Image (spheres, rainbow, N blue to C red):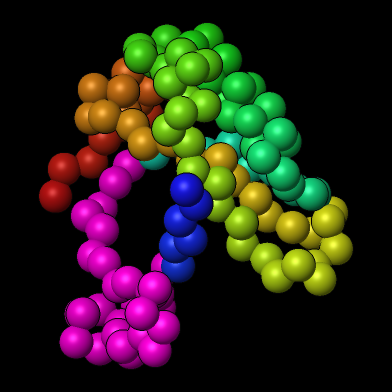
Amino acid sequence: HKIMKFILPAELDSMEKIPKPTNPHVQIESIPSQVGVVHRFSGFWSEAINDDVATALAEQLTLDGVEHMSKDFVLGQYQFWGYNPPFTLPMFRRNEIWVELTDQQVQQLLDKFQVPTTTN
């Protein structure tokens, strides 16, 4: 089961401003904000390539000390994000494998890499 998502422009900041879909299979949903980690890559993508990149991401997260990021977990949870139309030359394509992080996992990375946190 595949899902395609689009990020809408900032000016469409309420559900009332979003045009109603004409296709009954298209749904508009509000998704709560999330924090995640990405592995960015260019070139072609396929399910096999995405799985390879997700595996590499899981291995890096494990090396970085992020708990509960096994290869099996990441392979079951990642999202592929593609940003370019199909006619874009592969070397100029931007692709990402994204995995959501918990607050605890974010803190583990901030602590490891000594990233200062800001408070508002």
Name the residue nearer the viewer: 60 or 109.
60
Magenta stretch encompasses residue 12: yes
> Measured along the vertical axis of the image, is residue 5 above or below residue 27?
above
Residue 48 appears in the rendering: yes
Residue 63 is left or right of residue 106, and the answer is right
> Measured along the vertical axis of the image, is residue 57 above or below residue 96?
above
* Residue in view at x 67 percent, y 40 percent: 47
Among the 4 quarters of the image, the one containing residue 103: top left
* Residue in view at x 49 percent, y 43 percent: 79
> Measured along the vertical axis of the image, is residue 74 above or below residue 118?
above
* Residue in view at x 30 percent, y 73 percent: 28
Residue 4 placement (x, y as % from top left): 48, 61
Q: Residue furthest left?
A: 120
* Residue in view at x 25 percent, y 89 percent: 17
Residue 85 placement (x, y as % from top left): 70, 70
Name the residue nearer the viewer: 28 or 41.
28
Among the 4 quarters of the image, the one containing residue 32: bottom left
Residue 27 is left or right of residue 41, and the answer is left
Name the residue nearer the viewer: 56 or 71.
71
Q: Which portion, as a residue range, is magenta?
A: 7-35
Magenta stretch encompasses residue 19: yes
Secondary structure that dominates the magenta span:
loop
Residue 64 appears in the rendering: no
Residue 25 placement (x, y as % from top left): 39, 73
Among the 4 quarters of the image, the one containing residue 112: top left
